[in-house]
Amino acid sequence: MNNYDPTVFELGEIEALKRAVKFFRPVATTLVGSGDDAAVISVSDNRFVVTSDTMVENHDFRTEFSSGFDLGYKAIATNLADVVAMGAIPNAVVVAMVIPKTTKQTWLEDFARGMQEAIDYLAPSCAVVGGDLAAGDNIVIAVTAHGDLEGRKPVLRSGTRPGDLVAVAGTLGWAACGLELLMHQDPTLKAAYPEFVDIQLRPNPLIGLGLEVAKFATAMLDISDGLSLDAARLANASGVSIRLDPRALSGFEAVLELAAQSISARQVQMISERDWVLHGGEDHSFLFTCAKDSFLPRGCKVIGEVVEVDKAPLYFGAEVLEAKGWDSISG
């Protein structure tokens, strides 16, 4: 039995991609898929949503704890969340990759399986319709995702007004906690809290809930860089201030309290679950605002209110809250 695992570049681009793309499933909106110079997709509106995101090895992820499957799943999930935050239904993605010449073919196929599983679970009406593969020193993954508005107006960051509620659909702080667990020198920690590690490795944006919320939200965005940073972006875009309610956020903190205590017990520096909730990114939950009389579906929680613009865009109770979070350039 031959167990030899060739590298992608031993096989060559054509054969390597042929073996990898067999995992992708076409959908009805894909008129021309992978194989031509460009894909052709159908939309029901004369407008469509498009977004792009890049993941760079040793800056956005580390291969010592992220498998090819994890990275494929995460690359899809993060982009689908951006499409949904605009109120659109994801229908197509293209993926451009740079990989080292030592990359095994099994890794590339594992990556493809991760992408397709994310699509199957999060947005089955979507498909991978093309991309590009090139050689380089480190892994770089660039995904462009498209979405169909189906005649609806896009949900922008600039639509909220004083008097609106501020709410979140999904988790807060889980991915930041998961990253802390993965990075810690004590390997038993990540095994003790797998639910947080899983969200860091394979985010689970609530796509269906996000699309439901988009029907009545006045403003909305995907929490990718941290609640405080993204809430400040929303406030600045709308020309308002946002006041977060500490009591409403205490429940999010309570879920993470034991993990924070476990980490703190193993090191000199204390860990704050509040910092994870306020400033930790990558949960890819949806932050949105809506009228006070809105009916919030299950899975959403009111965490504050929109007020007239004040001396700062963001408050935690009565105190000004500095917006902090992930910066894609400086880290």
Image (spheres, rainbow, N blue to C red):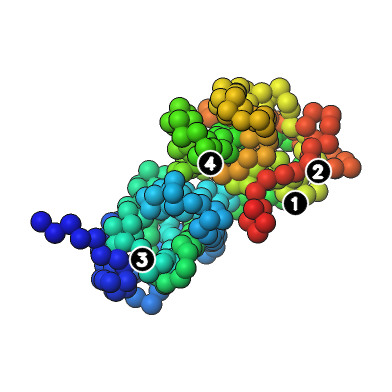
Q: CB of mark 4 within 8 Å of CB of mark 2? A: no
What crowding class fits label 4: few (fewer than 14 Cα within 10 Å), some (14-19), or many (20 or more)?
some
**Mark 1 and mark 2: span between their CA atoms?**
10 Å
Task: Please tell me whether mark 3 sits on a helix, a strand or a loop.
Answer: loop
Location of residue 35 with respect to 52 vertically, above or below: below
Task: Please tell me whether mark 4 sits on a helix, a strand or a loop.
Answer: helix
Depth check: 328 or 241 in front?
328
169 left or right of 311? left
* Residue wearing tag 4: 183
Mark 1 or mark 3, which is nearer to you? 3
Depth check: 242 or 264 in front?
264
Q: CB of mark 1 within 8 Å of CB of mark 2? A: no
Task: Please tell me whether mark 2 sits on a helix, a strand or a loop.
Answer: loop
236 left or right of 20? right
* Residue wearing tag 1: 237
Q: CB of mark 1 within 8 Å of CB of mark 4? A: no
- Is residue 244 in view from this perspective? yes
Depth check: 172 or 11 in front?
11
Residue 14: percent from left, percent from top: 29, 73
* Residue wearing tag 3: 102
